[in-house]
Amino acid sequence: MNRFGEKPFVSVVIPVRNEVGNIKRCLESVLNQDYEHFEVIVVDDGSTDGTLEQVKKVQEGSNKEVSLLRVESPECGWTGKNYAIYTGTKSARGNWLLFLDADTELYPNAISKAVNLCISNGLDMVSFSPEQVLVGFWEKAIQPVIFDFLESVYVYEVVNDPNTEEAAANGQFILVERTAYEVVGKHVAIRDEVLEDVALAKRLKLAGFRITFLYGKGIVRCRMYKSLKEIFEGWTKNLFILADYRWGLVLKTILGSCFWFSLPLLCVCMLFLFFINPEFLTAFLLFLTCSVLGFFYIGKWNRFKKRGYPGACAFLYPFGAGVSVVLFCVSIYRVLIKGVRWKGRVYRVRKKERF
């Protein structure tokens, strides 16, 4: 709150490009907030699939103003998302800016919780990693593997420690104080970043602003990808960048994924050998491999239960680990050689030096 006791005004900026299946649900969750002091700005980045019509339906049925801006294409040197967000902020009136992705769905008190967290703790930015809604087979198999990797790279406690250089954010939900955002150069300073959320967080932390990155349980949820094609396109564009181009980390992750993918197959092989030759050594190896796999499943089951994942995710994990190896390899190729593809556009990526 400001010195007059008024709650800060929040500008919610939502960049969209071909989000016909998501934007209506996202907007309705924003408009259903128990927080009253906010505006909504949707920036359409050349959608061709009916996204605009969905936004207009929400506009007509809402008693709260929803602004709709259109950008046919980003200016040279910009990614589409960054240019859309920047366009939205130029007309924003809020002293706090909330950047949302169209695939997110807010809980009714999400903005209230985020604002109160920032005000009560003197934060300049808070970002939440959404609860993951996992429906299809591929989502249940692959998404938990990827998020396990991300949580090992971007550890909440380390990121939130003001004495470390580590910084991170999730672009699906970022609430940032406007002055801090402007001091670090707004999205102009990160206009060509594919991983714009982490880049923004790094600039804020380096400039001395206080940031916090948390799991968004009870705040925001999303279903990121609905098919194997979407998973493939989504993660191969930035998985290697998320690893911060660290070859050692990537190699370690790939080898670990190969191990967990192979372990169930190894158990089957050992079982086959035991039936052929039921000696002590084969029995011991069968017991050992099955025990390791069993403890692995129990650990994943308990971990995923806390995350709200379906129970099947634990048993599909080895399969997802195998697919993740392919995602990493393709991401390396696209980031370093071919260029990353997203929403029908191709971006050339170059490794940035530390700010």
Image (spheres, grey):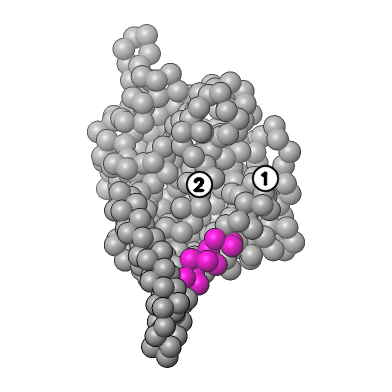
Provide residue 257's location: percent of width, then percent of height. Answer: 53, 63
Q: Residues within 10 Å of mark 2 (few under 14, many from 20)?
A: few
Secondary structure under tag 1 reads loop
Residue shown at the point (68%, 53%) measured from the top left: 247
Q: With 262 as the anchor, is 311 left or right in this view?
A: left
Residue behind mark 1: 192
Identify the residue at horizontal 42%, vertical 50% (top origin). 102
Badge 2 amino acid = Ser
What span is colored magenta in the figure?
254-263
Secondary structure of the residue carrying numbered label 2? helix
**Is residue 280 located in the magenta-colored stretch of the structure?**
no
Estimate the x, y position of residue 129 in percent, counting from the top left: 42, 44
Q: Which residue matches tag 2? A: 152
Q: Can I make out residue 56 in this image?
A: no
**Picture quarter with the C terminus:** top right
Q: Main secondary structure of the magenta part?
A: helix
Give the answer, above or below, for where 9 lies relative to 146: above
Q: Position of residue 35 (x, y in %)?
A: 28, 30
Q: Is residue 259 magenta?
A: yes
Q: Residue at x 66, y 34 (%)?
A: 189
Distance from the alpha carbon under mark 1 to that under mark 2:
26 Å
Of the numbered discs in the image, which one, if any, rests on residue 352? none
